[in-house]
Image: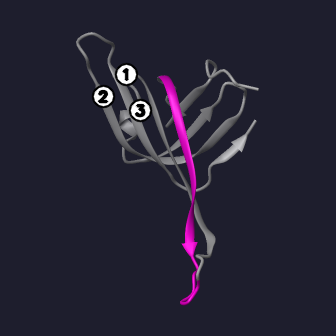
């Protein structure tokens, strides 16, 4: 069953801005364990990590003060699922267009575990 994102939300460093979308990427390293003479690669799983992006409308007071800091982050999907963890705010971009509203985007690098709760 599909989930509507209309009730989604995100908080970065205690600030719930006018976000309109977010993405979390969760990954694990792939460590090669292949031996000389092998015909096929072998591997084991390595360290896990996560990163996120968020974008929305900029009001001049959003999470720009958190750049470069380890910030508590909470991401809520439209069905009550909550992802939470600390992340370093690595980039904040502000976009201004003559025919639109001012928008901003945030890049975050996960710092330790990302927890999924309900």
Q: Residues within 10 Å of mark 3 (few under 14, many from 20)?
A: many
Which residue position holds label 1?
A: 58
Q: Given contact means CB atoms under 8 Å apart, are the residues at marks 2 and 1 in contact? A: yes
Q: Earlier in the sequence, mark 2 or mark 1?
A: 1
Can you tell which quarter of the image residue 89 is in?
top left
Which residue position holds label 2?
A: 94
State the predominant SS element of the stretch in magenta.
Answer: strand
Identify the element where label 2 is drawn.
strand
Q: Is residue 30 found left or right of 106 in the rendered image?
A: right
Q: Nearer the viewer, mark 1 or mark 3?
A: 1
Query: Residue at point 32% right, 33% down?
Result: 93
Q: Earlier in the sequence, mark 2 or mark 3?
A: 3
Which residue position holds label 3?
A: 63
Residue 72 forms part of the magenta stretch: no
Identify the element where label 1 is drawn.
loop
- Foreground pick, 75 / 79: 79
Read off the magenta span.
19-38
Compared to residue 87, the image places residue 10 above or below, namely above
Q: Position of residue 92 (x, y in %)?
A: 34, 36
Query: Residue at point 31% right, 12% down?
Result: 100
Query: Residue at point 67% right, 47% down?
Result: 115
């Amino acid at each position: 069953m599909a989930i509507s994102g209309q009730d989604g939300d995100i908080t970065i460093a205690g600030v719930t801005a006018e976000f309109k979308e977010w993405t979390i990427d969760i990954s694990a390293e792939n460590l090669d364990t292949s031996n000389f003479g092998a015909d096929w690669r072998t591997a084991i799983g390595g360290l896990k990590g996560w990163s996120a992006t968020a974008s929305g409308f900029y009001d001049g007071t959003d999470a720009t003060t958190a750049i470069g800091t380890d910030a508590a982050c909470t991401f809520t999907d439209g069905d009550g699922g909550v992802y939470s963890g600390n992340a370093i705010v690595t980039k904040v971009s502000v976009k201004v267009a003559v025919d639109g509203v001012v928008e901003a985007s945030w890049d975050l690098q996960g710092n330790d575990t990302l927890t999924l709760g309900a």
